[in-house]
Amino acid sequence: MKKFHHTNFKLHLLLSKVINMRDSLSIQNISKSYNDTTVFKLISFNINPGKIYNLSGSNGAGKTTLMKIVASQILDYSGEIFLGKDNIKDLDHYYFTKVSYLPPLPNLYQHLSVIENIVFFTKLNNIRNPELAESLIHSFNLNDFKSKKIYKLSDGTKKKVSILILFLINPDFFILDEPYTYLDSEAINVLNNLIINSTDKGKSFFITDNSSGLKNIEFFESVKL
């Protein structure tokens, strides 16, 4: 019988305690309407530390709208969202250090280079981790593109840069809206490995995507609109 090393066991317990000490996101009775049209009504679920959640629904069901609400990018809704015991509307900038949203289309500065975008967004978020930045650049095969302006890049390369920046910022909650759009199979594998490794460290993911990129991701729970 295989023996479990005592040091590894203590490390496992310590990691479990750290994960359990993290706050959850609690989405409570969220409803959204535009004029007289109801997009969705009374949606409730939790996003717990170290777990991956899937958001599914037909086109027009409001998946992006719900993700933006959870990410506090849309403030006009009914219901409440709590980070731990705090309503997210009371948290101001602090909330954005914990929760980050990746949109379907890359949102980068087009006339800055790849490395200039990386430096800008990491400084904006008070992040300094050049070793991780270089590792992610290598993983996504971006070494040959570092000095190129964003507007000269393909959509797939732009998406890699956006994902790279998000994992450098490294929030507690990753809100990923169609993250696999434009990615090739190699980049999909890199992203999935990042997601799995991050959940082992207590990070949480809320993902919507209709592509096959999710086939190797095991969800803790699915939310359907």
Image (cartoon, grey):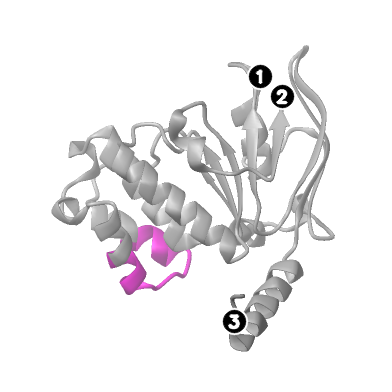
| Residues shaded magenta | 119-134
Mark toward the start of the polypeptide (2 vs 3): 3
| Quadrant that contains the C terminus | top right
Q: Position of residue 4 (x, y in %)?
A: 62, 80
Q: Which residue sits at x=64%, y=33%?
A: 55
Q: Is residue 220 above or below residue 121?
A: above
136, above or below 16, in the image:
above
User: Where does label 2 land, which residue?
Assistant: 225
Is label 3 in contact with label 1 (beta carbons under 8 Å)? no
User: In the rendering, which numbered label is found on residue 61?
Assistant: 1
Depth check, front residue: 117 or 28: 28
Tell me if 163 is positioned left or right of 148 in this view: right
Residue 29: percent from the left, percent from the top? 85, 35
Residue at point 18% right, 56% down? 143
Residue 120 belongs to the span the image colors magenta: yes
Q: Report how far apart the C-alphas of labels 1 and 2 lie in the structure.
A: 6 Å
In the rendered image, residue 139, in percent from the top left (x then y), is placed at 29, 56
Q: Which residue is mark 3?
A: 8
